[in-house]
Image (cartoon, grey):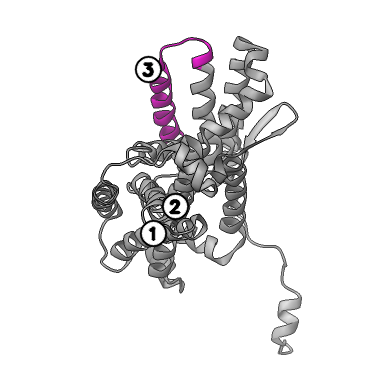
Amino acid sequence: MSTPQSYEAAVAGSPQTVAEFDHGPQSFIQKFQHALHVTPALVPLLVLLISVVIFGVLLGSKFFSPFALTLILQQVGIVGIVACAQSVVILTAGIDLSVGAIMVLSSVVMGQFTFRYGIPPVFSVVCGLACGALCGALNGWLIAKMKLPPFIVTLGVWQIVLASNFLYSANETIRSQDIAEKAAFLHFFGEKFKLGGAVFTYGVIFMVALVLLLAYVLRHTAWGRHVYAVGDDKDAAELSGVNTDKILISVYMLSGLICAFAGWALIGRIGSVSPTSGQLANIESITAVVIGGISLFGGRGSVLGTFFGALIVGVFTLGLRLLGADAQWTYLLIGVLIIAAVAVDQWIRKVSV
């Protein structure tokens, strides 16, 4: 008769290695596919580097000058900030068509509160930021609590916010000269400073800081992991204890707040407060997100990829302009990049993790 063995002794004598599936030898293509799956920002980074090299060879020092390279950052500053808002939404397998309208309404609130009601610019900016956050919270509540589709909700809110913007502002523009004279704080993000031969604005610094902050939060906090979990499989996230309604509301509210910051940066960029500005921000932000490798199905991608996607659009725009090409070539090539990005995303999704 064998001697009884304790549980601890049995465990101590058992193998300590974790079971693994043997996939056999992988080809270079399979390894590359897996690398892209693990690091989604790698694709837009490669496209960005290739684009810079091509335009650098064609244009030489005209393109590689510090002024030209920082001009690209200034041109994509607004789109980059709005694209960050769009990124966190799309990571949850949603979409926000109202980002551009929220951005403009927030800027109008900042300007009107300052010049119509005589509120100090600092408090007007706070009111504008609150306006953006409330619009985003409305989106999130309708999607999370009322269970309405994100596309329909944000399409409706886009129309409501856009109409409210024109009705409230009476379609009047606050001139740059008046802002510079009485409320220079509204121009803060447009102020420039030199670093070597490069010229930066505080709006560009804010965009880069926002990208880095969101990248850290999404990857290294519980909230960020929950965002990915909701986008990957909402039902599974609920079963694992994630409050998906709370996550969705917070994501759309954060999106609205970021759009309000973009509205403040927009005032600094164009100088004035115009209710007709930034009308294409929703399309441009989705373009940057898609080219940046964030999956429209949610749960995969990174804000760094979105940043690279925005820079790709900026590089193509400036490079083709310096080459003297027709502006329509920019739209054509960006359209090709969008389709290619979605095709690559579908190919990457087939990899076994």
Asked whether the residues under the numbered discs 2 and 3 touch, taking CB atoms below 8 Å apart as contact, a structural biologist would say no
At 56% from the left edge and 33% from the top edge, which residue is drawn?
74
Q: Amino acid at mark 1?
A: Cys
At 30% from the left edge and 54% from the top edge, which residue is drawn?
150
Q: Which disc, if any, is residue 131?
A: 1
- The residue identified by callout 2 is 260
Place residue 275 in its image quadrant: top left
29 or 121: which is nearer to us? 121
Place residue 31 in its image quadrant: top right
Asked if residue 182 is among those painted magenta in the image, a careful observer would answer no
Q: Nearer the viewer, mark 1 or mark 3?
A: 1
Q: Amino acid at mark 3?
A: Gln
**Label 1 secondary element:** helix
Between the C-alphas of marks 1 and 3, the distance is 36 Å
Asked whether the residues under the numbered discs 1 and 2 touch, taking CB atoms below 8 Å apart as contact, a structural biologist would say yes
Of the numbered discs 1 and 3, the one sitting upstream in the chain is: 1
- Residue 219 placement, left or right of 179: right
Sort mark 1 into few (<14), some (14-19) or many (20+) by Cα contacts within 10 Å. Answer: many
- The residue identified by callout 3 is 328
